[in-house]
Amino acid sequence: MKFGIIVFPGSNCDADCYHVIKEVMNQPVEYIWHKENTVAGFDALILPGGFSYGDYLRTGAIARFSPIMPAVIDFAEQGGLVIGICNGFQILLEAGLLPGAMLRNRSLKFICKPVFLKVNRADTPFTNHMKVDQVVRIPVAHGEGNYFCDQNTLQSLKDNGQIIFTYCSEDGQELPEFNPNGSLANIAGICNIKGNVLGMMPHPERCSEEILGGRDGFYIFDSMINWLEEVGK
């Protein structure tokens, strides 16, 4: 089993993800530079947070055309496990691997703070070591995390069980006041129909060990490892 972390110019959470996979989860992991054109030999890919290409055009819009992205898209279409975190989520949207788009935060300000999320499914590669309706505390750090899509797409996401995480209160209330960025339907993370591609705005790599004040993010990576081990049997 080997994880690959895609590194774009401006990625700034790549080292955090590497640390969690290698030192916390004790799994083989390598960086993949954006100018590479293959992901052969990897079992799971992480698109980390940051400001790819400086976010000078639109978040994720330039990174979507990096040389590595055709290989990432093909990997995902073949059923490979892909998680995009924050800027990585934005890139997955721009690449068409997930539906919808990101708008500026409702406040028009950068937000960096812990938030509460409700787990809506526990049968995905990313949540199988979690429970339905479990509330986890994971930090956000973004300026454009306001998820948006048209009403038909939103209904499709709901019908197909693609909304994996929603912003909520500590006791699980999904109300507007607990939504940090104005995201439609309090959406914090979605997957594709197959369930092998997840995009989420909160940063699980920043809370995967107690020394950082909590380890709720640990269970997402642990779920991925469990799923890969089960598939490999």
Image (cartoon, rainbow, N blue to C red):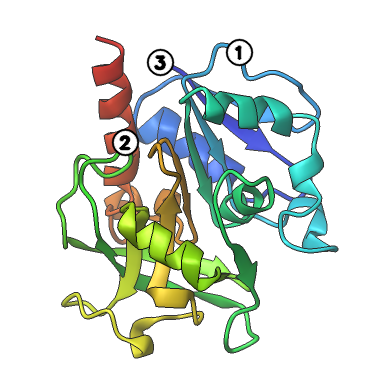
Q: Earlier in the sequence, mark 1 or mark 2?
A: 1
Asked if the residue under mark 1 is in contact with the one under mark 3, i.e. CB atoms within 8 Å, the reply is no
Q: Quick one: label 3, few (<14), some, or many (20+) residues within 10 Å?
A: few
- Going by the numbered disc 3, the residue's amino acid type is Met
* Above or below, comparing residue 70 to residue 199 in the picture: above
Image quarter where the N terminus lies is top left
Q: CA distance from mark 2 to mark 3?
A: 15 Å
**Residue located 51% across and 22% down the image:** 78
Q: Quick one: label 1, few (<14), some, or many (20+) residues within 10 Å?
A: few
Q: Position of residue 195 (x, y in %)?
A: 38, 39
Label number found at residue 1? 3
Q: Position of residue 138 (x, y in %)?
A: 36, 63
Closer to the camera in the image, 205 or 177: 177
On screen, residue 78 versus residue 159, left or right, reads right
Q: CA distance from mark 3 to mark 1?
A: 12 Å
Asked if the residue under mark 2 is in contact with the one under mark 1, i.e. CB atoms within 8 Å, the reply is no
Q: CA distance from mark 1 to mark 2?
A: 20 Å
- Going by the numbered disc 1, the residue's amino acid type is Ala
The residue where tag 1 is placed is 40
Classify mark 1: helix, strand or loop.
loop
Q: Position of residue 176 (x, y in %)?
A: 37, 87
* Above or below, comparing residue 188 to residue 200 in the picture: below
Label number found at residue 99? none
- Going by the numbered disc 2, the residue's amino acid type is Pro
The residue where tag 2 is placed is 125
